[in-house]
Image (cartoon, rainbow, N blue to C red):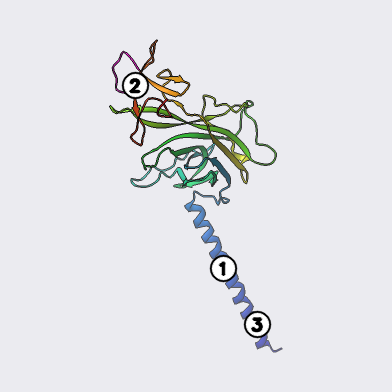
Amino acid sequence: MTALQDGEKSVFNNARTLRSRYRKLARAMVISTLAFATGGCVFAPAQSFTLQADVPADFRVKADAYYVPATGETCEAPPRKRGEVAPNRKFFKSEFQNVARTAEFQIPLTTRAGGCPLVLRSLKLNLRAKWGPDRWDTDGDFASLSFRDVLGADFSALPGSGAQEFQGQCQWLFRTVSTTRIIVKILHCRATGADGQMVKHMAGGVLQRDQLPGRTVRMVFKMAEQEAPYFDLYWFKTAGGWKPCGGVWGRDIEELCLDPPQFKDFKMPDGRTCTVYPNCTE
């Protein structure tokens, strides 16, 4: 090989080396720019867990996730802009279906807002159910989950495998409204105890955040077979069903039962005038 050919080869190799260095420099500049835009660090993709909600037929499920600055951060999420979702909130929805089912959502454990790293702090599960054929014949209640960096000694950790389950039950409560005393229903959802009976507190629990990536949290809601009065002691239980009481106040709707009880008639949503619920007549 001649000296000229050696020189040409050297120039070619140098040019290729320079191009390689320019490409590496360009990549480094892009990464630096992204890091600056996100607050000076390059973060791993957000981790998430699977939220499942087992609900009866004719239920809609909405999940409202709320995020706060990670521990040790001094930043704050920017304020909500008019007409937009707040930067520290995420919403998930599964519409009404006429069969019992499992609604499922992937819930991020972390997010960013305005360069501020945020972690999941709480999640409100909004339940809404239909009790009649009209579109306004619905009512709702909710359950909730809280998330912590570390759980206290009085909280249990996730099981080694499988889903973490929280049990709940919903029940329809009935009452009358307006001068016609027409029946409407209120959805009442609570946690259930070890015996399967409803307790006073909401369904849900507290979870440790770093135990959740890739795991499943399942919330199970059953519907009580029997309805109950919304106002305790305002309806009198008979062999044929519940009868609304009249009293000393002279209100149009049901009142506190007297001894002996006095009764009022009422209307079913379909317009029938009745004396006992839910059978209408004794």
* Residue mark closest to the camera, 1 vs 3: 1
Please indicate, yes or no, whether residue 204 appears anywhere in the rendered image: no
Contact flag, marks 2 and 1 (Cβ < 8 Å): no
Q: Which residue is mark 2?
A: 264
Q: Which quadrant of the structure image shows residue 10?
A: bottom right
- Which element type, helix, strand or loop, lies under badge 2? loop
Residue extending farthest to the right is 1
Q: Residue 226: x, y in percent?
A: 50, 29
Q: How many marks?
A: 3
Q: Is the stretch drawn in magenta largely helix, strand or loop? A: loop
Q: Residue at x 71, y 88 (%)?
A: 1
Residue extending farthest to the front is 282
Contact flag, marks 3 and 2 (Cβ < 8 Å): no
Of 163 and 42, nearer the camera is 163
Q: Tell me the kind of residue under disc 1.
A: Arg
Residue neighbourhood size for the residue with mark 2, other residues' Cα within 10 Å, grouped as few (<14), some (14–19), many (≥20): some
Gap in angstroms between the C-alphas marked 1 and 3: 21 Å
Q: Residue at x 34, y 24 (%)?
A: 265
Q: Which residue is mark 1?
A: 23
Q: Which residue is mark 3?
A: 9
Q: Which quadrant of the structure image shows residue 264?
A: top left
Q: Earlier in the sequence, mark 1 or mark 3?
A: 3
Q: Is residue 154 in the magenta section?
A: no
- Which element type, helix, strand or loop, lies under badge 1? helix
Q: Tell me the kind of residue under disc 3.
A: Lys
Span shown in magenta: 246-253
Q: Residue at x 54, y 37 (%)?
A: 72
Q: Residue 33: x, y in percent?
A: 49, 57
Please indicate, yes or no, whether residue 243 appears anywhere in the rendered image: yes
Q: Tell me the kind of residue under disc 2.
A: Lys
Q: Earlier in the sequence, mark 3 or mark 2?
A: 3
Q: Residue 282: x, y in percent?
A: 42, 25
